[in-house]
């Protein structure tokens, strides 16, 4: 199957495309990318509300009714920061001011995503030449498989997990406990898997910028892995519900359809998972009842976990610039940017990154927000 990408990947692709256009001195194209981010965020909540509604209406006899979580991510501070810098560069100070206010709103209204001190905002009336830095650290989340088992009694399937509180996970995330499935007999057993996010973080605890012999502090502007987790939670109930539905249809198809066609299966299964029945009847009749419904663990491997920013005002001239990354035991890495010519006629935006991560497991689903 084609990989459509997670929602946060789709959003951050536009961030990095905008940075690429800035590096090519194509400010107009960079601004187009930022507007696309705003449009995608506006569409995000409606997207899953519609899919949840379609699932809930897919069968009359299923007792599984999903609830659509409200999207808590409406405003991206990193995108707003880039927009502010471009508007200021073009002399559109009123538009720059509006983006600055949007950054304030992001930290105030989305405090669960921006739960760290807000960095100082770029100066709209700099006395010297503003030099800006966007610095990335860590690695974006990975996916791991969470394993559950489906067993049955008369007309009922239920879920078990080796780990403690596995049933609570299904109840909290997808509203699934025991499921009424007409036609299923005792003895049905399948293993199923769901994806969870594995947050990898960063070994970097502090970033500094060295310009000639002077060092400057760098501030966090975006916890990108937390936003990845937030957007993943919007989709996860659907992932769980569809995986359970596919697994049950596979098993029941095998159980009741050895000598029957699709119409008989549909009569036995009732309305359960009508969203998927057409596909299941075509491909699942020879699947063993103890087969595994595997988790889709595809995910990008190249996004960072955190974004940092700094603005430093300098006199025009040549400066030796270095970005220093520190961990718990001191300096980890120094990114030598070399001697750079700072001019009031240039955009003066520098990027740097250090991608080493730490092993940190944070469940991608710890109850509904």
Image: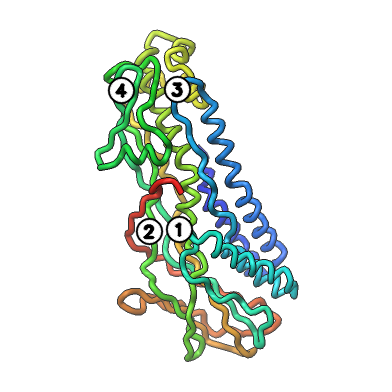
Q: CA distance from mark 2 to mark 4?
A: 37 Å
Task: Quickly name the residue at label 4.
Answer: 152
Q: CA distance from mark 2 to mark 1?
A: 8 Å
Indicate which disc, 4 or 1, sits on the residue closer to the N terminus.
Answer: 4
Query: Dot 4: what SS?
Result: strand
Q: Position of residue 183 (x, y in %)?
A: 38, 14
Query: Dot 1: what SS?
Result: helix
Task: Quickly name the residue at label 3.
Answer: 283
Question: Vertically, is 335 above or below 127?
Answer: above
Query: Of the residues tagged 2 and 1, which is closer to the observer?
Result: 1
| Outermost residue to the top | 259
Looking at the image, residue 91 sits to the left or right of residue 338; the answer is right
Query: Of the residues tagged 3 and 2, which is closer to the observer?
Result: 2
Q: Are marks 2 and 1 in contact (CB under 8 Å)?
A: yes
Q: CA distance from mark 3 to mark 2?
A: 37 Å
Looking at the image, residue 236 sits to the left or right of residue 74; the answer is left
Tell me the number on the disc at residue 2. none
Indicate which disc, 1 or 3, sits on the residue closer to the N terminus.
Answer: 1
Indicate which disc, 2 or 4, sits on the residue closer to the N terminus.
Answer: 4
């Amino acid at each position: 199957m084609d990989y459509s990408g997670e929602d946060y990947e789709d959003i951050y692709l536009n961030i990095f495309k905008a940075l690429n256009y800035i590096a090519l001195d194509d400010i107009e194209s960079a601004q187009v990318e930022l507007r696309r981010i705003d449009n995608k965020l506006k569409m995000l909540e409606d997207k899953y509300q519609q899919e949840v509604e379609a699932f809930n209406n897919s069968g009359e006899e299923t007792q599984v009714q999903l609830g659509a979580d409200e999207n808590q991510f409406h405003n991206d501070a990193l995108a707003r920061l880039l927009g502010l810098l471009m508007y200021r560069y073009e002399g559109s100070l009123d538009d720059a001011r509006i983006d600055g206010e949007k950054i304030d709103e992001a930290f105030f209204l989305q405090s669960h995503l921006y739960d760290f001190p807000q960095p100082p905002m770029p100066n709209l009336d700099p006395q010297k030449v503003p030099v800006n830095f966007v610095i990335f650290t860590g690695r974006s989340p990975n996916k791991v498989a969470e394993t559950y088992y489906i067993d049955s009694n008369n007309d009922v399937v239920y879920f078990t997990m080796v780990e403690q509180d596995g049933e609570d996970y299904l109840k909290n995330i997808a509203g699934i406990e025991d499921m009424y499935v007409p036609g299923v007999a005792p003895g049905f057993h399948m293993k199923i898997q769901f994806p969870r996010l594995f947050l990898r973080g960063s070994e970097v605890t502090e970033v500094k910028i060295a310009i000639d012999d002077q060092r400057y502090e760098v501030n966090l502007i975006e916890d990108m892995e937390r936003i990845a987790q937030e957007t993943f939670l919007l989709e996860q109930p659907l992932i769980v519900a569809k995986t359970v539905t596919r697994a049950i249809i596979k098993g029941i198809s095998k159980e009741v359809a050895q000598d029957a066609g699709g119409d008989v299966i549909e009569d036995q299964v009732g309305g359960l998972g009508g969203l998927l029945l057409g596909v299941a009847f075509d491909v699942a009749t020879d699947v063993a009842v103890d087969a595994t419904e595997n988790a889709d663990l595809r995910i990008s491997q190249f996004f960072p976990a955190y974004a940092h920013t700094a603005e430093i005002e300098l006199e025009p001239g040549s400066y030796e610039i270095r970005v220093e990354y520190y961990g718990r035991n001191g300096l980890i890495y120094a990114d030598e940017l070399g001697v750079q010519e700072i001019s009031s006629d240039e955009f003066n935006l520098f990027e740097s990154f250090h991608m080493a991560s730490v092993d940190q497991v944070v469940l991608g689903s710890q109850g509904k927000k």
